[in-house]
Image: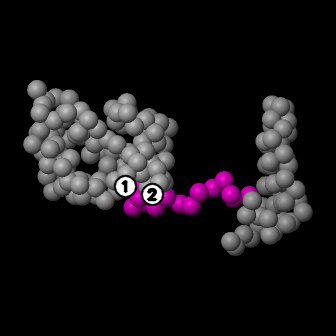
Amino acid sequence: MDFNLTLKDRLNLYNQYTILQKLSEMQGDEHEAAFYELRAKIISEGYIYDYYLLTECLSDDFSLEEAKLVWDTLDMYSAIYFSYEKLENPKLTREQINFDGFDGNHEIRSMIYCRFIINDLGRFAELSGNGYEDYNSHSQCCNKYKNMIQKWKDMGKPYELSEDQIAKLIKIY
C-alpha cells in the first residue's frame, strides 16, 4: 500500500486520534482509548510500515456495478411485493415472492450493502420480515437476480405486475 502523508496530514491525524483517545477515556472505554493511543503513536513516530493499521477498518470500494445490482434487485422485489399485495386470491404464495437476500459466503458485500440500504437508509421496508432479516439467502443469488432484472426490463420495468408477470420473474433460476 502506498501511503504518503505530509507533515500536515500527520499532525491532523495525530490530533484526531488524541482527541478520540481522550473522549474514549472520558466515556470509560479503555479498549477504545488504547486503540486510538496506538494510532496516535504510529502517526507521531512516523512508523510508515505500520500505517496500514490506520486503514484496516476500511473496506475496499463497493463498485457502482455491484451497488446497482443490489438497488435494482430491491427495486424489482418492491414492485413484486406491492403488485402481489393488490392481487385478489393469488395462486402464488408469499414465500414464493419473498426477497431472500444475498449469500453470506459468496455475496457478502452485496448482503451487507443490502442491509445498509434497508436498515440504515430505511428504504424498502416492505422487504423485511420475510424470515431473512439478516438478508443472508444461504445460496448464491446474484446471477438469478441479474436474469430476473433483465426479464423485468424486457417487460418495461412495470411497477404494477400481473400475477403472470410475477410468476415469470420468480421462475427464472
The residue shown at (43%, 45%) is: 136
Total marks placed: 2
Q: Quadrant of residue 67?
A: bottom left
Task: Pick the quarter of the image with the C terminus.
Answer: bottom left
Q: Quadrant of residue 60?
A: bottom right
The magenta stretch spans residue 111: no
Residue 61 at x, y percent in the picture: 53, 60
Residue 119 at x, y percent in the picture: 47, 36
- Name the one closer to the observer, 71 or 112: 112
Q: Please identify the residue farthest to the top as the structure is shown.
A: 88
Specify the label residue 140 is tagged with: 1
The residue shown at (81%, 69%) is: 48
- Name the one closer to the observer, 6 or 135: 135
The residue shown at (84%, 60%) is: 43
Question: Tag 2, which secondary structure?
Answer: loop
Q: Please identify the residue farthest to the front as the structure is shown.
A: 138
Task: Pick the quarter of the image with the N terminus.
Answer: bottom right
Q: Is mark 2 in CB contact (under 8 Å) with mark 1?
A: yes
Give the crowd class for mark 2: few <14, some 14-19, many >=20 residues within 10 Å: some
Going by the numbered disc 1, the residue's amino acid type is Gln
Instruction: Name the side, left or right, on which 159 lies relative to 69.
Output: left
Q: Which residues are magenta?
A: 54-69
Residue 19 at x, y percent in the picture: 82, 43
The magenta stretch spans residue 60: yes
Residue under label 2: 106
Q: Quadrant of residue 158?
A: top left
